[in-house]
Amino acid sequence: MVKVYNSIKDEHGNLIAGVTKLFIISTQSDHTIGKFISGIACVPEGNGTMFIVDEWIINQVDKVQFKDGALSVKDGEELIPPVKTEKELQREALLKQIAELDSQPSE
């Protein structure tokens, strides 16, 4: 299954890092995604379907299908998420701690 987000922004109106828009313009008869545009600032023109997905999905969109209104991984394919470095993991942990501190009431 492909993770789809409800919004590209968090509850404070800030862009969520690592997510982007995927606008599907057309598909093939086997549900393969044909034409699409992507990016946080993409402005679709015409008919299509918009999803908010992890940025790394875009490079592997050939492994994804659009069927019955949902995104899923094609049979026999596997999405490979990027491996995070130790520095990236530490940064995420620190940002999470900062967000938790910011959400606490002032004393």
Image (cartoon, grey):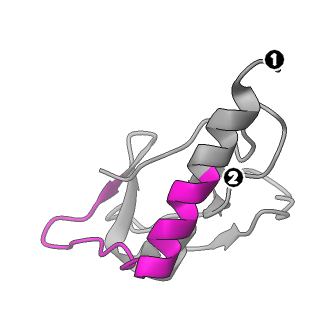
Of labels 2 and 1, earlier in sequence is 2
Query: As rendered, which of 58 and 37 lies closer to the eye?
Result: 58
Contact check, label 2 and label 1, Cβ < 8 Å = no
Quick one: 94 or 47, which is closer to the camera?
Answer: 94
Q: Nearer the viewer, residue 24 or 39?
A: 39
Residue 41, position as x, y percentages in the image:
85, 63
Q: Which residue is at 87% across, 60% downward?
A: 43
The three-letter code of the residue at mark 2 reads Ile
Q: Residue at x 70, y 70 (%)?
A: 37
In the image, what residue type sits under mark 1?
Glu
Q: Position of residue 58 (x, y in %)?
A: 53, 74
Q: Which residue is mark 2?
A: 16
Rendered view: 93 above or below 96: below
Which residues, given as a range, are shown in magenta? 72-95
* Whole-number angstrom distance, CA of label 2 to CA of label 1: 29 Å
Question: Dot 2, how many residues are within 10 Å of its Cα: few (below 14), some (14-19), or many (20+)?
Answer: some
Position above or below: 84 against 53: below
Query: Hey, which residue is sitting farthest front in the picture?
Result: 107
Q: Which mark is residue 62?
A: none
Left or right of 15 in this view: 24: left
**In the depicted structure, whether residue 102 falls above or below residue 74:** above
In this rendering, position of residue 77 left or right of residue 82? left
Q: In this rendering, does residue 24 appear at all?
A: no
The percent coordinates of residue 83 (x first, y second) are: 36, 79
